[in-house]
Every structure is written in structure tokens, then in C-alpha cells.
Image (cartoon, rainbow, N blue to C red):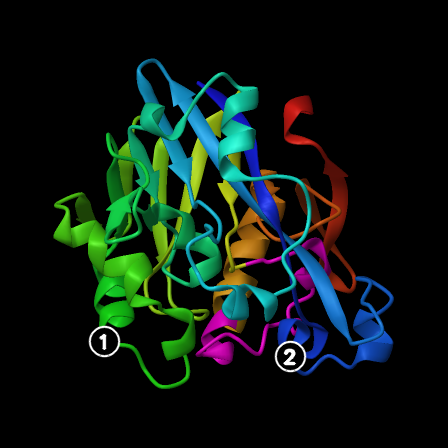
Amino acid sequence: MNLYPINTGNLKLDGGAMFGVVPKVIWGKSYSSDENNLCNWSMRCLLLVDGDRRILIDCGIGDKQPDRFMANYHLNGEDTLEKSLAVLGLTVDDITDVLLTHLHFDHCGGAVRWNKDKTDYEVTFKNATYWTSRQQWEWATNPNNREKASFLKENILPITEKGRLELIEGDSELFPGVSVRIFNGHTDGQVIPFIKYNGTTIVFMADLLPSAAHIPLPWVMSYDTRPLITLKEKEAFMAEAAQNGYILFLEHDLYRECVTVEATEKGIRLKESFALETV
């Protein structure tokens, strides 16, 4: 098995929303923001190549939303999904499986695109099976008012309409060497992949841990629907990660790709940060 980061571009989000109850005078020391209090975040996906199977975890925001929508998120950077795949000699047609951790637009928007004449939507990865949890699918297709703006029907419904969707029922081994667990604090049924790789375990953190700055337990996003559940999930997971030496692959941290954590007198804290290619 080989793993490759797939950078799909960056977006800006309000720092207060990203760090919740933590005041800017504190979080500002750990993550930078501009004059409008906006922080820049990556949309870093992960490609697993194992024989003939090419598994893409999340796929960025895509490019089919209208300009007025995209302008709200100040998209920036030169990377796109297609460019990052091309560096590896691949196209979207080479992907066999797309694992969507959850269905917020910045994680799944690239799953669906316009057809050539923009009369209908089509799945971006025409040869792939799409995976997400049953909990998340039901949550996203019957959205609550708080998350409704993040669940865009054009990102979601064409996947099942085109017959490409498989639902994950719970914690399980999805592929050889790739197991998944379900977390419910950020959104119901978020899928977190655990990957056996080069004698260690790499965990794709999605929005369970958006950045290394979020390692301290109280640093929970305002976007989380159940912050106290997030707190419990983080506490248990971070202790496990420190004990077992997991490598945490960060989807949204603009500055750090992978990190490890350790137990200290102040709780779980950052140990090391490094690029995936060094693992």
C-alpha cells in the first residue's frame, strides 16, 4: 500500500467559529488569521493505492457551486483535485472507491460535477463506489436547521441517483488494512479511517481534529453539533493515539500534514509534526 496527500485547495473560515469558546488572544498564538479574523484552512485529502484499488478519502469542495457561494469562503491556492492526481499520473477515472468522512460541502463537494453542457449533474468518479455511514447519509438528507447550509443536495443526491452509494453500518474493516470508526460529536455518523501502514497506524482525522491547534480538549469548533460529545470522543481518542503512537493525518491544518501526540502534565499535547512522505 502507498499513501499520497491530495491537496484540493484552501478556504477561509472565521476563527471564532473554528475555535469555539477559546478566545482569540489564546488561539491566535497557535493559528494565524487575517484582519477580518479569517483563518486559512487546507482541504487535504488522502489517496490509498493498494494493487488495483485506489481509495480516495474525501474530495474537497469541487467547482460547481456559483461564484457567490465560493466567494463566502475565499478559495485560494493553486492546488486542485485534478492537478494533484495528475502529479501521480492519475485521473478521476482511476479512482475505485471514494470514502466520504461526512457530507459537509468542503469534504464532499468534489464528488459530483456538472456534465459537459451543464444540464445535469454527474458523479466525478465514474468508476468508483462511494462510501459513507448510514447515520451520516440519513442525517444529511434530512438536515437539521443548524447544518442545513452545509449539506447541499447537489453534492449528495446524485450519488445515490446514479447508483454509486454504499452505506457503512458501523465500526468495521472496510478494506484490507483500512478500518473505520463512527464519531458523532461534529456531525452524526462521521467516519474516521484507521490505516495500517509501514508498521504504524495512520488516522485520517477529518473534523474530529481539524488542526494541530485543536489538540487540547476544550478546543472544539462551534460547527460541532454536539460539542460535549466531541469532548468525550476527543478525550478517549487522544489518549489512545498517545498510547499507541498513532500518526494523525490532518485534513484542514494549512501548516502541518501529520502529527503525533503525547501525554503531558497538562494533558495530551503535540509531540511531532512532519510530512506523510517521511513515514
CA gap, disc 1 to disc 2? 25 Å
Labels 1 and 2 touching (C-beta < 8 A): no
Q: Which amino acid, by three-letter code, is at mark 2? A: Gly
Determine whether 264 is above or below 116 in the image.
below
Residue 221 shown in magenta = yes
Up-down relation of residue 160 to residue 137 (above or below) = above
Residue range (magenta)? 209-230
Q: Which residue is mark 2?
A: 20
Closer to us: 163 or 192: 163
Depth check: give the residue in front, 26 or 111.
111
Tell me if I can see residue 250 in this picture. no
Category of crowding for the residue at label 1, using alpha-carbon neighbours closer than 10 angstroms: few (below 14), some (14–19), many (at least 20): few
In this figure, which residue is indicated by the disc labeled 1? 142
Classify the position of the N terminus by image quarter: top left
Instruction: Please give the label number shown on residue 266.
Output: none
Q: Is residue 163 left or right of residue 226?
A: left
From the viewer's perspective, is 279 left or right of 23?
left
Report if residue 9 is visible in the image. Answer: yes
The amino acid at mark 1 is: Asn
Question: Would residue 168 be found to the left or right of residue 11 on screen?
Answer: left
Q: Residue at x 86, y 78 (%)?
A: 25
